[in-house]
Image (cartoon, rainbow, N blue to C red):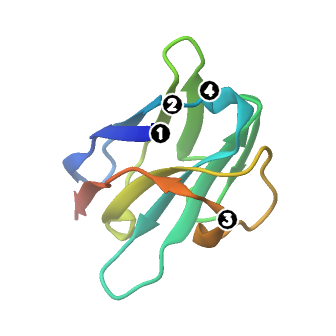
């Protein structure tokens, strides 16, 4: 049975850092497109970052240079390191597993399995 268990997140002041984790069971994440999405109240779920083959990464323009997506194949765990956080990064963050490879500008419907989400709150 496929499961994505998220941890991390919390509250931080602007300029701070947080790291999100997503432990997968029931699949080998290095064989799939893995993603982080986020959703703020009243807004659509938006792509933050994707990784496939444990090598190729893509980022939303709003987080480029500040966020890093990575995975640990041995631990079957996906990470999102978030640095220089801004108040506009405040959202519920979700990990997701998708097809065998990623492409530009993926949307939530491209992904079939989701973590339960973890809240990130950045205060000014």
**In the figure, 123 relative to 72: above or below?**
below
- Sequence-earlier tag: 3 or 4: 4
Q: Which mark is residue 28?
A: 4
Q: Which mark is residue 26?
A: 2
- Sequence-earlier tag: 1 or 4: 1
Q: Which is more foreground, mark 4 or mark 2?
A: 2
The answer to whether one can see residue 66 in this image is yes
The secondary element bearing badge 4 is classed as loop
Within the image, what quadrant is residue 106 found in? bottom right
Q: Which residue is mark 1?
A: 2
Circle 2/circle 1 CB separation < 8 Å: yes
Q: Which is more foreground, mark 1 or mark 4?
A: 1
Residue 2 vs residue 89, the one in the foreground: 2
The secondary element bearing badge 1 is classed as loop
> What x and y, as percent, mark residue 111?
61, 59
The secondary element bearing badge 2 is classed as loop
Identify the residue shown where x is 67% and y is 65%.
110
> What x and y, as percent, mark residue 103?
81, 57
Circle 1/circle 3 CB separation < 8 Å: no
Whole-Å distance between the Cαs marked 2 and 1? 4 Å
């Amino acid at each position: 049975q496929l499961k994505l268990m998220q941890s991390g997140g919390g509250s931080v002041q602007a300029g701070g850092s947080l790291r999100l984790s997503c432990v997968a069971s029931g699949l080998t994440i290095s064989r799939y497109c893995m993603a982080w999405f986020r959703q703020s109240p009243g807004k659509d779920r938006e792509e933050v970052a994707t990784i496939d083959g444990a090598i190729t990464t893509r980022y939303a323009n709003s987080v480029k240079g500040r966020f890093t997506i990575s995975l640990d194949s041995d631990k079957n765990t996906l990470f999102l390191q978030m640095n220089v956080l801004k108040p506009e990064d405040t959202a519920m963050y979700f990990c997701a597993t998708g097809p065998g490879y990623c492409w530009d500008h993926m949307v939530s419907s491209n992904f079939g399995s989701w973590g339960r989400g973890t809240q990130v709150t950045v205060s000014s």
